[in-house]
Image (spheres, rainbow, N blue to C red):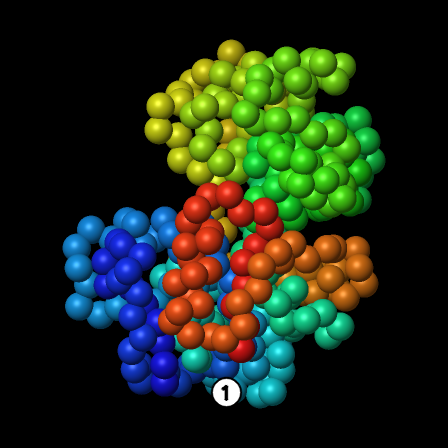
């Protein structure tokens, strides 16, 4: 079967090659891929390759397709089911014709939503869900109207779904956006207030009549905003992030007794935790939300044709760092 991988840390190292099709065992599914989405983790993973690889590394952490065969212990899926998922960092990704994936991190695909709108959503939704409901410990069934969350990089992939989930949970949502197009985008998704991350966040938030916020989610480089984060977070508030701290010091949050949390969507699958199945459950809810219109897909660019050229083009677009929403490739 065809697969697409990288052999070093350069964009030009993408190659098409033949790979032997695997047989699913245990709780694994073999899925015939019909759509993928490109995420920043694809770029970060490629750039962290130190030496030239003999065997190309297959990236891709959003997938949509049809179950081709199943392992002997599979409980929730059958051959022919349409499914979608975000993947497992320890295994080959979705940039191949067929992918092996554990059923616990897979969900039935939306029935009324297109391939491109569906496959844009798994990784970012899992990341945003774990950020809000596990790391910030927000109860979506509670009355959260008195709580405020600041989402830095609101127009990006994760930010675009985090805004929707936070809005649905009843929080007052402040999102950052830097252009008129992106301001409209985040407002349409449910942001109550918008500030520009290229300008002084402290002044802008205070000008809105808000002294401090209960929660801050960092979805871009935290270092340029670190002093603003430390100043704006409430005492005993929570700051959670998906990106590294290079120069910023976590101890700056100590005086306010701020809770700090990392979010890496692949942790549960990497360490084979029992909570892996939570991801399948999150995605089942996502499928229902997309079909009912409660959740808006954040796909903004679609490439037609699952081939090497389109994988390179889509990756280059995401790597540019100015994307609004998500980029998808479908057959």
Observer able to see residue 85: no
Residue that appears at 74% across and 18% down: 208
Foreground residue among 314 and 238 = 314
Q: Residue furthest front?
A: 180
Residue 182 seen from this side:
yes
Task: Tell me residue 326's x, y (percent).
Answer: 57, 55
Indicate whether 121 appears above or below 234.
Answer: below
In this view of the protein, which residue sits in the foreground, 97 or 311?
Answer: 311
Q: Measured from the top left, where is residue 95 in percent x and y? A: 41, 70
Taking the spot 54% from the left edge, 58% from the top edge, the residue there is: 327
SS under mark 1: strand
Which is more toward the observer, 261 or 170? 170
Residue receiving disc 1? 69
Residue 29, x across and y down, in percent: 49, 79
Q: Residue at x 35, y 29 (%)?
A: 246
> Is residue 191 positioned above or below 283 on the image?
above
* Residue 77 sits above or below residue 134 on the image: below
């Amino acid at each position: 079967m065809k697969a697409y991988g990288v052999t070093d840390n350069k964009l030009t190292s993408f190659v098409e090659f033949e790979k032997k099709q695997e047989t699913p065992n245990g709780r694994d599914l073999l899925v015939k891929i019909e759509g993928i989405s490109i995420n920043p983790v694809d770029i970060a993973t490629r750039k962290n390759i130190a030496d030239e690889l003999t065997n190309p590394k297959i990236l891709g952490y959003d997938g949509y397709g049809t179950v081709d065969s199943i392992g002997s212990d599979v409980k929730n899926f059958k051959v022919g089911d349409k499914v979608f998922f975000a993947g497992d960092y320890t295994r080959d990704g979705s940039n191949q014709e067929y992918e092996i994936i554990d059923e616990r991190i897979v969900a039935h695909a939306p029935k009324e939503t297109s391939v491109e709108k569906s496959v844009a959503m798994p990784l970012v939704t899992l990341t945003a869900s774990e950020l809000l409901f596990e790391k910030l410990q927000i109860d979506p069934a509670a009355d959260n109207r008195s709580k405020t969350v600041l989402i830095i990089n609101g127009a990006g992939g994760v930010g675009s779904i985090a805004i929707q989930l936070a809005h649905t949970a009843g929080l007052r949502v402040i999102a950052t956006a830097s252009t008129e197009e992106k301001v409209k985008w985040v407002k349409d998704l449910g942001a109550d207030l918008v500030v520009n991350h290229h300008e002084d966040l402290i002044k802008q938030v205070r000008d809105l009549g808000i002294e401090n916020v209960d929660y801050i989610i960092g979805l871009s480089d935290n270092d340029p905003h670190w002093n603003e984060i430390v100043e704006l977070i409430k005492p005993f508030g929570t700051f959670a992030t998906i990106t590294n701290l290079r120069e910023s010091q976590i101890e700056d949050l100590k005086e306010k007794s701020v809770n700090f949390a990392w979010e890496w969507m692949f942790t549960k699958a990497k360490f084979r935790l029992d909570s892996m199945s939570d991801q399948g459950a999150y995605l089942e809810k996502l499928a229902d939300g997309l079909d009912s219109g409660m959740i808006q897909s954040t796909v903004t660019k679609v490439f037609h044709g699952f081939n090497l050229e389109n994988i390179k083009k889509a990756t280059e677009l995401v790597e540019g760092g100015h994307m609004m929403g998500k980029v998808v490739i479908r057959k």
